[in-house]
Amino acid sequence: EAQVTQNPRYLITVTGKKLTVTCSQNMNHEYMSWYRQDPGLGLRQIYYSMNVEVTDKGDVPEGYKVSRKEKRNFPLILESPSPNQTSLYFCASGPGGSPLHFGNGTRLTVT
Amino acid sequence: GDSVTQMEGPVTLSEEAFLTINCTYTATGYPSLFWYVQYPGEGLQLLLKATKADDKGSNKGFEATYRKETTSFHLEKGSVQVSDSAVYFCALPGGRGGSYIPTFGRGTSLIVHP
């Protein structure tokens, strides 16, 4: 089954404690992206990747890192999380110009 | 650059009412257009798409027509159900900065009461 898998679904952490949200896709897509979704602000892109070892900043990259060492995986790293990074995060992948496939989301709370 | 403007929500309807969610876009050329739906607790999924002007996309009773002259792609459904309660996103597939970067509207929340 074609899918984008994010883990964990829920995460509660404290300020400053490094965390990683994993994302994996099984469709051999070149394009992958991370979004955060906040009430009233819609989807905002954090980082994206056009292919292995090719990543670029989206609209709200501050406080986040990503890596793309393999085509299927695109982890999101928060080196020192802060409360303003409390949000719902989505990973997505897709072939160029076509609809994206989204994961089911990771709800992060930073206290 | 590319942009998508959707009507603000929430849109609150009774079951069997007619639904319209407006979407207009600004883009270079004539791109494909998409509507995504996000059900509670889930990620976005493609609802329907249109790939060229005057195309009508349809799925699950929803329809949207790609109107080049008005740069619009309004979502409609003749009779909504409680199960249609969700957030709906209009989107362009790419084009920001000349690369494949999708552009999403802010989303419109639909609440359908029995």
Image (cartoon, helix red, strand yellow):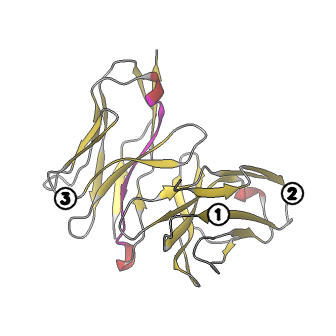
Looking at the image, residue A85 sits to the left or right of residue B24; the answer is right
Q: Horizontal and vertical percent for residue A79?
A: 79, 72
Distance, label 1 to label 2, CA atoms, is 22 Å
* Residue A104 vs residue B71, the one in the foreground: A104
Q: Vertically, is B81 above or below B88?
A: above
| Residue B52 numbered tag | 3
Residue A50 drawn in magenta: no
**Amino acid type at mark 3:** Lys
Residue A57 got which mark?
none
Three-letter amino acid code at disc 2?
Answer: Val
Question: Chain ID for label 2?
Answer: A
Disc 3 sits on a residue from what chain?
Answer: B
For marks 3 and 2, give the one nearer the viewer: 3
Q: Check the image and report above or below for A33 versus B47.
A: below
- The dot on residue A14 is 2
Query: Real-space Cα distance between discs 3 and 2?
Result: 48 Å
- Report x, y in % for residue A82: 78, 61
Tag 1 residue: A23
Callout 1, which amino acid?
Cys
Q: Residues within 10 Å of mark 2 (few under 14, many from 20)?
A: few
Q: Which residues are magenta?
A: B84-95
SS of the residue at dot 3?
loop
Q: Nearer the viewer, mark 1 or mark 2?
A: 1
| Left-right relation of B63 to A98 | left
Where's residue B77, x and y in %? 29, 31
Q: Are marks 3 and 1 on the same chain?
A: no
| Magenta span contains residue B94 | yes
Q: Which one is earlier in the sequence, the residue at label 1 or at label 2?
A: 2
